[in-house]
Amino acid sequence: MAAIVQSFDSKASATPSSSDAIMRVEDISMRFSTPDGVLTAVDDVSFAVRPGEFLSVIGPSGCGKSTLFNVIGGLLGGYEGRVSVAGETITGPHASIGMVFQEESTFPWRTVVDNVAFPLELSGMAKAQRVERARHFIKLVGLDGFENRYPSELSGGMRQRVSMARTLAFEPKILLMDEPFAALDEQTRLLLGDKVLQIQQQLKQTTLLITHNITEAVQLSDRILVMTYRPGKIKRIVDIDLPRPRTSDIVSSEAFGRYVAQIWSDLREEASRGMSDDEKTRQGGHPR
Amino acid sequence: MAHAGQLTAARTPRPALADPVTMVRIAIIVGVLAFWEVLSRSGWLYRDVVPSLVAISKAVGELLIDKDYYWNLGWTGFEVAVALGIGGVGGLLAGLILGSNKLLGKSFEPYLYYLGPTPKIIFFPVMIMWFGIGPGSKIALGTISCFFPIALSTAAGMRQIKPVLISVGRTYRANAWQMMTKIYIPAMRHPIINGIRLGLGVAIIGTLLAETKLSNKGIGFLIINAYSTFDMPRMYALLIVLFVLSIGVNALVGRFGGLDKIKRS
């Protein structure tokens, strides 16, 4: 038990030395004006991502996770603070950041191979070459044999893997994923987690995962940032000291259970604040 | 959409002749033909208003070997094709602009919605003054007929694109041309094809209507010519042939749309 408490060294692991970080998120705040006044979605969030690590941001609904995802991905402007990759400030979608969305985002009019080759096609790679690269990434996510199928012929989990392969084909320095498995059932999610671990192992891919699923976060991550409910701040940073390579078998280990319990005790308070806010709104009152 | 596909698929196996629906369908045709023939021979109506089936069949035969008919058919086809080309490209561009620009979209759309269902034949006199009584005025009328449905369904289609697909394009840093050709247009292919189907229909109507009003060539001209010389068998023959042609064109466009459906579903 003592070992786990020790691993919650909150500020120290949040800001590694500058040489250490591939991406830095510095003092990000995002405010929206609503009819009820100014809403602070993200409040002064700072953290650094180390090369090769799997970092998860976990928080209850309404903690500004998706806002953070869009800010880091360069899809949303109008925030305070700075996001930088290898020292370069992000001002829009950046070649070193590849995004996988929560929503179904495959192109229904393209086959699996053409979907995955899409970013390569944009960069003007020759057809034979990009098909070959696409096949490589399709194999990596375990969809070989489905190259010439259309997304509508695949299951939801397979389609998310197509989206992931497409973004991996973009060869980003940082893979940024927003609850990519949120719409899938628990079993599929665990199995896809295995796939992600395996890919992570193989590519040494730096990954930033936005999620609200504790099991998923613990299963996959090296570190987890726990966020507070509105306004979204970093509540705690948890180092997940579980052995790698991992598989989904890890979920039955005692250490895994302790991490899940610890994160849940942090999140419970936030989630219940979110819930009571939601209930107030439904009664006609206003959330803070 | 998916329903249409299923229906077509379900219909593909040829129904047996003994199928009750087929029997009734055949009975309907036989009944109508018999009624027509009886009416024609009864003498109740003014002579030749309802010519006998024999006379009509003969006229159809004559029509099908008539070089004049093909020449006029060619003109009508040409007019419709040019109208669909101009109106289609114009409608597509207008739809893309109105769909992508909120200010322009909101400002122009009420006019498009009001002008859209207006019978375009009311502009025919203006078109004659501008383009003469030849094919020019027919093409113009066909063009303005098909412009509206294509522009409106393109603009509507643009607004129905899933925002996440646009985000995907942005994260892969697609340029404006790539966004248009690789995301917007393919994502809108169903509304666009639908708009073209509707557009083709109204372009044919507009062109034929214009030809029957004032013209010197085309199928509409032949029909009204047969009517004014009281050549009823020939007029009916023209109508029948035109009817069959329309069914054929519709089936062709439907098939085009259907092919696309297979790719999607």
Image (spheres, coloured by chain):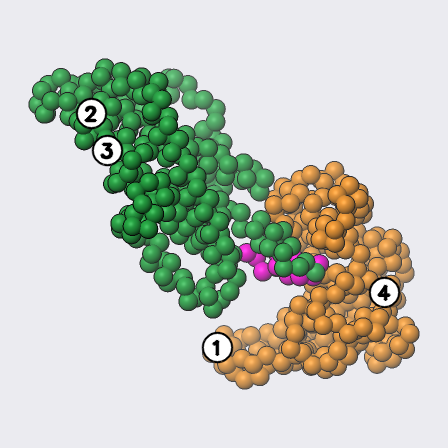
Cα distance in 3D space between marks 4 and 2: 85 Å
- Which mark is first along the chain, 3 or 2? 3
Find residue A283 and name its label.
1
Dot 1 and dot 2 residues touching (CB under 8 Å): no
- What secondary structure prevails in the magenta region? helix
- What chain letter is assigned to the residue under label 3? B
Quarter location, residue B247: top left
Q: Which chain is orange?
A: A
Residue beneath disc 4: A53
In front of the other: label 3 or label 1? 3
Q: Which chain is green?
A: B
- What chain letter is assigned to the residue under label 4? A
Q: Could one spot residue A58 in this view of the protein?
A: no
Amino acid type shown at disc 3: Ile
Which quadrant holds the C terminus of chain B?
top right
**Of B172 and A100, which appears nearest the observer?**
B172
Find residue A210 and name its label.
none
* Residue at left offset 64%, top offset 77%: A78
Q: Could one spot residue B135 in this view of the protein?
A: yes
Q: Total number of numbered labels? A: 4
Q: Secondary structure at mark 3?
A: helix
Cα distance in 3D space between marks 3 and 1: 71 Å
Q: Is residue B162 magenta?
A: yes
In front of the other: label 2 or label 3? 3
Q: Is residue B40 left or right of residue A48?
A: left
Q: Secondary structure at mark 2?
A: helix
Residue beneath disc 3: B224
Dot 2 and dot 3 residues touching (CB under 8 Å): no
Dot 1 and dot 4 residues touching (CB under 8 Å): no
